[in-house]
Amino acid sequence: MAYPDRLNEAWAAHLAPRGPNAPTVVSTFAGCGGSSLGYSMAGFEERLAVEWSEKQAASFRANFPNVPLYLGDIAALTDDEALRMAKLVPGQLDVFDGSPPCQGFSTAGSRKFDDGRNQLFLEFLRLLRAFKPKAFVMENVRGMVIGKMRVIFADIMKQLKDAGYRVSARILVAGHYGVPQMRPRMILVGIRNDLAPVAQPSHPLPFAIAPTVREAWHGLVNTPEECAVARFGENRIVHRLLYRMAPGESGDKYHPNKQLYGLHRLDPDKPSPTLLRNGGAGGACEACHPSEHRRITIAEAKRLASFPDAFVLRGSFEERWAAIGNCVPPMFMRAIASHVRRLIEQATSHAEEDHAATT
């Protein structure tokens, strides 16, 4: 099945009604809804989303109008209010999900121990203890396990285990799960201790060769307006670089000031490198079209991040780019969510068999 057809099939799964026994998920740091879409594609019913940014929440609401959304600082969301909004009691939730903002850990940032964004993990942990879900999934960047940040990572692992979970952590690459982007993410999977003897925490095995940029964009038609907003304006140096750059090349090959003129022309016959929140690909480069002298459009970026064309993004060009760059690719999360769903079903089935045997 061609990549655009797979996106359409997954979108149809997202739109399908949920049955009464559908697994449940709560999503923190929800952003525009990349992770939420992945869970929905895997058949989950989302009971609550938490997001502080009004701009990102506008996109979330456009795609998930029936999901209760707490808009505000997660630190101000009490345990009781979260449980009330989700209509759940402790221990009932299937999966608690979240991507605590990762810039403090990111290899693209300064990776400071005292970065305030790192402390948001403690709010994730607090709500995890409140919900006591059967499993949790936490996503972050691979910078968590590089250099001195390994000390923080070890503390995070200890606190998650102390909360009552067996935890497995692994760096996965989105391209190995059908996404046309070689984006690495640190994925932590936790299974509650009472279920762990049956369902040990684990990760989905790679099952795909990453689609190329050309495959990702098959059949995509940009509007003139989308192409116009993606152009660079009148900067002569940028245009001179674009004329020289071949597919797969970066502008710093031809100009020493990468900070000012960081461009990367995508290779149509390879997957995209990581798309960043500032419109970059790889380091801090602007992701440029393989043959046209412009940035890639939002529609093109959505395909590379595995968002179906029907997914709505609100806001300016920069705000929509930030949404794409910050998110977990939905098809990547679909693979993770499907795997964790099987773990939970395995543990639940075993518990029911034990109960039947003792009655």
Image: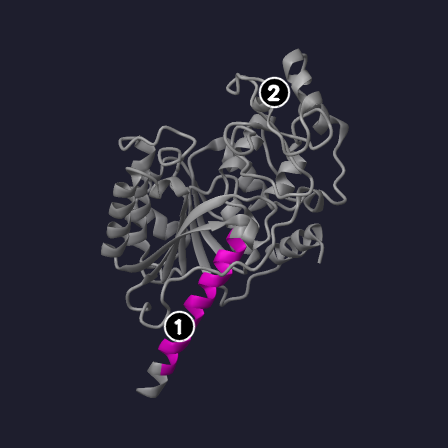
Task: Tell me the quarter of the image containing the N terminus.
Answer: bottom right
Task: Tell me the quarter of the image containing the C terminus.
Answer: bottom left
Image mark count: 2
Label 2 packing within 10 angstroms: few (<14), some (14-19), many (20+): some
Q: Tell which tag, 2 or 1, sits nearer the viewer.
A: 2
Residue range (magenta): 333-353
The residue furthest front is 253
Q: Quadrant of residue 300?
A: top right
In the rendered structure, the answer to whether residue 76 lies left or right of residue 60 reads left
Q: CA distance from mark 2 to mark 1?
A: 59 Å
Residue 234 spot, x, y in % from top left: 68, 12
343 is within the stretch colored magenta: yes
Q: Earlier in the sequence, mark 2 or mark 1?
A: 2
**Front position in the image: 61 or 212:** 212
Q: Is residue 248 above or below residue 239?
A: below
The residue carrying mark 1 is 348
In the rendered structure, the answer to whether residue 253 lies left or right of residue 226 reads left
Residue 292 spot, x, y in % from top left: 73, 28
The residue carrying mark 2 is 254
Residue 22 spot, x, y in % from top left: 50, 64
- The amino acid pointed to by label 2 is Tyr
- The amino acid pointed to by label 1 is Thr
Regarding residue 235, the answer to whether it shows in the image is no
Label 1: state its secondary structure. Answer: helix
Q: Is residue 1 above or below residue 326?
A: below
